[in-house]
Image (cartoon, rainbow, N blue to C red):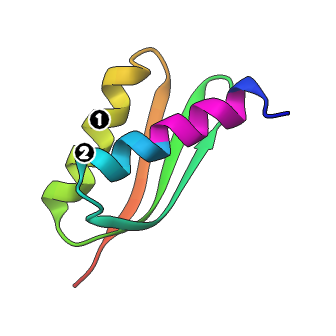
């Protein structure tokens, strides 16, 4: 049975993939009680920022670290 943290991570991952039109790949969302970390690769800096802002809207009180790398 998934925990609340696992469920939230899956929900955030799905939102990012949907809102960025899958411009972020190898996406990993790590959730702890106070923090969310996004890791993966993006086509553009815009996709990286869009991923970040999509998550920020859903968890505005949590610390958000965006470790998504933009492909050169």
Secondary structure found at label 2: helix
Q: Which residue is mark 2?
A: 19
Q: Is residue 31 left or right of residue 2?
A: left
Secondary structure found at label 1: helix
In the picture, residue 6 is in which quadrant?
A: top right
Q: Is residue 9 left or right of residue 42?
A: right
Query: Callout 1: few (<14), some (14-19), or many (20+) C-alpha neighbours within 10 Å?
Result: some
Who is closer to the viewer here, 7 or 32? 7
Earlier sequence position, callout 1 versus callout 2: 2
Q: Which residue is mark 1?
A: 54
Q: CA distance from mark 1 to mark 2?
A: 7 Å
Q: Count the numbered circles shown.
A: 2
Q: Which residues are magenta?
A: 5-12
Name which residue lies at 59% across and 39% down.
9
Which marked residue is nearer to the observer: mark 1 or mark 2? 2
Q: Is residue 68 left or right of residue 2?
A: left
Please provide percent x and percent y for residue 13: 47, 46
Please provide percent x and percent y for residue 71: 27, 79
Q: Specify the quadrant that holds the C terminus.
A: bottom left
Residue 2 visible? The answer is yes
Q: Is residue 14 above or below residue 45?
A: above
Residue 32 visible? The answer is no
Query: Callout 2: few (<14), some (14-19), or many (20+) C-alpha neighbours within 10 Å?
Result: some
């Amino acid at each position: 049975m998934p925990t609340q943290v696992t469920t939230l991570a899956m929900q955030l991952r799905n939102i990012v993939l949907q809102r960025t039109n899958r411009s972020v790949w190898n996406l990993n969302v790590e959730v702890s009680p106070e923090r969310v970390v996004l890791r993966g690769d993006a086509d553009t800096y815009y996709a990286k920022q869009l991923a970040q802002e999509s998550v920020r809207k859903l968890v505005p009180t949590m610390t958000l670290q965006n470790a998504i790398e933009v492909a050169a």
